Image (cartoon, rainbow, N blue to C red):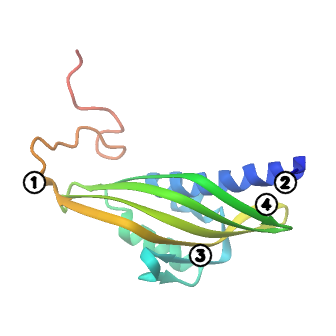
């Protein structure tokens, strides 16, 4: 049976991952940096995009995702977390959607994240994150009849442009 401290650790680790994803989707690179270890590493898309420091990770994400036309939604579930003192390993199922209104595409996919976390100065932080795709599909938005982006956190301040009732 798990102790209350272990259950608390699990919840803190979940919060770190959820914060990571929220910061990705809100393009909050400062907030994201606050939950990464200075020596964090990342290997996205089966290692195709790999980075050896927090600064490299944040620079890549900023360069790749900061355009106003880039919209993403990342959701993880089914966490499998193993605690080992001040270290933890986790596997997460990922589902994501990307819509880029400038480059006119929509991407959907699924993957499994494999993460490592460490408790440093009493706080759980992400030390390593990797994912390998189960699948990924991409569509030109022109191939989706009736496709219209009707709300955007950045372009419309999150408000729908559809008329009310």
Residue, disc 4: 123
Could you tell whether 31 is left or right of 161 in the image?
right
Could you tell whether 109 is left or right of 56 in the image?
left
Could you tell whether 144 is left or right of 77 in the image?
left
Task: Confirm or deny contact between disc 3 and disc 1 (CB under 8 A).
Answer: no
| SS at mark 1 in the image | helix
Q: Of tags 1 and 4, which is closer to the observer?
A: 1
Residue found at x 81% / y 49%: 7
Task: Pick whichever of labels 1 and 4 is earlier in the sequence.
Answer: 4
**Distance CA(mark 1)–CA(mark 4):** 46 Å
Residue, disc 3: 54
Task: Pick whichever of labels 3 and 1 is earlier in the sequence.
Answer: 3
**Distance CA(mark 3)–CA(mark 2):** 27 Å
Task: Pick whichever of labels 2 and 4 is earlier in the sequence.
Answer: 2
**Distance CA(mark 2)–CA(mark 4):** 14 Å
Rendered-image quadrant of the C terminus: top left
Q: Local crowd at mark 3 within 10 Å, few (<14), some, or many (≥20)? A: many
Task: Pick whichever of labels 3 and 4 is earlier in the sequence.
Answer: 3
Residue, disc 1: 143
Residue 6: which disc?
Answer: 2
Of residue 1 and residue 13, the one placed in the foreground of this image is 1
Outermost residue toward the front in this view = 1
Q: Is residue 88 above or below residue 38?
A: above
**Callout count:** 4
**Distance CA(mark 2)–CA(mark 1):** 49 Å
Q: Local crowd at mark 1 within 10 Å, few (<14), some, or many (≥20)? A: few
Q: Of tags 3 and 1, which is closer to the observer?
A: 1
Q: Local crowd at mark 4 within 10 Å, few (<14), some, or many (≥20)? A: some
Residue 131: which disc?
Answer: none
């Amino acid at each position: 049976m798990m102790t209350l401290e272990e259950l608390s650790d699990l919840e803190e680790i979940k919060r770190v991952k959820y914060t990571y994803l929220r910061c990705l989707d809100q393009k909050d690179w400062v907030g994201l940096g606050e939950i990464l270890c200075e020596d964090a590493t990342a290997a996205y898309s089966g290692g195709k995009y790999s980075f050896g420091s927090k600064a490299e990770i944040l620079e890549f994400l900023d360069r790749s995702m900061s355009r106003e036309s880039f919209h993403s939604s990342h959701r993880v579930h089914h966490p499998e977390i193993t605690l080992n003192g001040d270290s933890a390993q986790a596997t997460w199922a990922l589902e994501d959607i990307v819509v880029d209104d400038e480059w006119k595409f929509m991407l959907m996919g699924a993957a499994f994240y494999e993460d490592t976390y460490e408790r440093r100065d009493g706080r759980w932080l992400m030390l390593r994150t990797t994912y390998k795709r189960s699948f990924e599909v991409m569509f030109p938005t022109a191939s989706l009849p009736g496709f219209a982006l009707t709300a955007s956190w950045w372009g419309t301040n999150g408000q729908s442009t559809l008329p009310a009732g």
